[in-house]
Structures are given as C-alpha cells and as structure tokens.
Image (cartoon, rainbow, N blue to C red):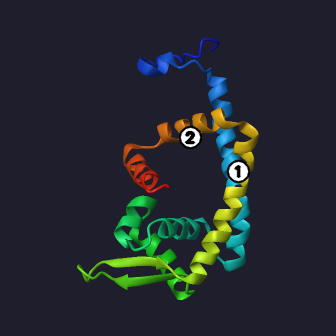
Amino acid sequence: MADGKSGGNTGSESLLFLTDEQLRKGIEAMFFAYRGFTQDPDRILEQHGYGRAHHRAVHFINRTPGTTVNNLLNILGVTKQSLNRVLRALIEDGLVESRVGKRDKRERHLYLTETGKLLEAELSEAQRGRMRAAYREAGHEAVGGFRKVLEAMMDPDQRAYFDAFKEGES
C-alpha cells in the first residue's frame, strides 16, 4: 500500500511511514546481515567443534565474569538442558571454569579461562571488524539510528539485560 498503512491495523502502526514492501526489505536485510555477521565466527567455531550457542555463552560469560548459571539462562533464553550441554563441553575443553558460590553453595559461577578468553577475543574481533566497517560506511547518524531500531525491537526483559550491559560500558 502506498500510504504505508496495512489493512485493519490501528494505533501506532497506522502512523508508520514505511510501506509493507519497505518493511519486507528491512526484514530481509536483517536476515542477510545476520548471516554475514555470524559467518566469520561460525568458521572459527567450526574449527573447535562448537556452534553459535557456545559463542553466545562465551560472549556473555566474558561480559559478566562470575555470572551464575541461572543468570546466563535468563540472558540467553535457552533451556537448562541446552545450556548444560554447552557448558559441559566448554568446561571439559578448558574454556570455562565453574566455581561454587561463596554465599550460596548451590550456585555455580562461571569464568572464562585464559584459553576461553583467547577464543572469545578471536570471535569478537571478527565481529567487531565487520561492525566497524559497516558503521564506517554507513556514517555516524546511521549508527545511532540503527542502534535505536535494534533497541526498539527488543522485548522488555531483553532490553533490561541490554541496558545493564550498557551501564557497564566505558
């Protein structure tokens, strides 16, 4: 539709200035951008026999050293069984260390080992390089707008975790 309004939609969606075709193109752009964003780390992970779940665990353990298994479950939004499978492999391979909580012996706190930190750095640098190049090409204003769009798409609980990470930025 040329006016950007879709059929029976009401409320704020009717104020959207993009056409359905433009929105579809944006969705497709996200799919292909995500594919590009993950392909470099995927190649690195494959060399170690890991997948994207391992990458996400390593990333967030690095961002919050000492995080609990329960906190990581909430951040990643995966099942306990799925996370345990990932953590078991990372611990057995010497990338993650699990320590019993000092205050609560039932808690397990997670830390990257030196080997884990090296893998995380390699994975992050691959993604930072791609982001840096894309941001440079898009320009300063586009970077701010892109971040606003991503933040607006987050569910409130995910946004709370994201905001907590943002507060820790220097």
Which residue is located at x 41 percent, y 18 percent?
A: 11
Mark 1: which secondary structure? helix
Left or right of 34, for residue 111: left
Which residue is located at x 42 percent, y 59 percent?
A: 75
Residue at the top extreme? 3
Left or right of 61, for residue 130: right
Tell me the amino acid under the disc marked 2.
Arg
Q: How many marks?
A: 2
Residue 37 falls in image quadrant: bottom right
90 above or below 11? below
Please name the residue that numbered disc 2 is placed on.
Answer: 147
Please name the residue that numbered disc 1 is placed on.
Answer: 132
Q: Residues within 10 Å of mark 1 (few under 14, many from 20)?
A: few
User: Can see residue 77?
Assistant: no
Left or right of 116, for residue 11: left
62 above or below 17? below
Left or right of 15, for residue 122: right
* Residue 31, x across and y down, in percent: 66, 45
Which residue is located at x 60 percent, y 71 percent?
A: 120
* Residue 156, x across and y down, in percent: 38, 43
